[in-house]
Image: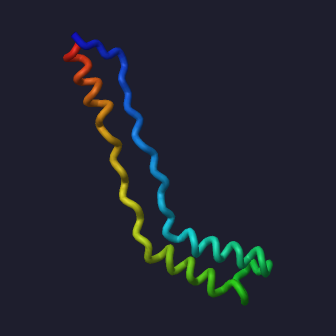
């Protein structure tokens, strides 16, 4: 007879990929280099690139949680 008191499986955590990250980094580095926070001259192109990226990038879909812990708990009741 197998007895499983509490068995949990932790899912692997994956880092989300930010598609507009390089454009944001370019704009922030431009702001830091030129001290142009109002996008008036030097950083206008970097800001427009970031805005375009944010407008066109699709939102990530909701990731469903794995159901393995539910099934393990259900099987644990039958095994006991």
Examine the image and state in which quarter residue 62 appears: bottom left
**In this view, 44 is above or below 78:** below
Q: How many marks?
A: 0
Residue 38: image x %, image y %? 73, 80
Which color mode does the image show? rainbow
Q: Residue at x 36, y 51 (%)?
A: 63
Q: Quadrant of the C terminus?
A: top left
Residue 10: image x %, image y %? 41, 35
Examine the image and state in which quarter residue 56 appears: bottom left
**In this view, 45 is above or below 31:** below
Taking the view exactly as shown, the residue that stands out farthest to the bottom is 41
Residue 3: image x %, image y %? 28, 12
Q: Residue at x 47, y 76 (%)?
A: 55
Taking the view exactly as shown, the residue that stands out farthest to the right is 35
Q: Residue at x 40, y 69 (%)?
A: 58
Q: In the image, is 59 to the left or to the right of 64?
A: right
Q: Residue at x 36, y 23 (%)?
A: 7
Q: Quadrant of the N terminus?
A: top left
Q: Considering depth in this image, is 55 or 6 the residue closer to the camera?
A: 6
Q: In the image, is 37 to the left or to the right of 11?
A: right
Q: In the image, is 44 to the left or to the right of 14?
A: right
């Amino acid at each position: 007879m197998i007895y499983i008191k509490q068995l949990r499986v932790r899912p692997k955590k994956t880092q989300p990929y930010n598609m507009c990250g390089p454009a944001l980094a370019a704009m922030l580095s431009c702001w830091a280099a030129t001290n142009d926070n109002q996008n008036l001259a030097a950083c206008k192109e970097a800001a427009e690139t970031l805005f375009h990226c944010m407008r066109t990038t699709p939102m990530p879909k909701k990731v469903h949680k794995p159901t393995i812990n539910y099934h393990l708990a259900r099987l644990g009741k039958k095994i006991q």
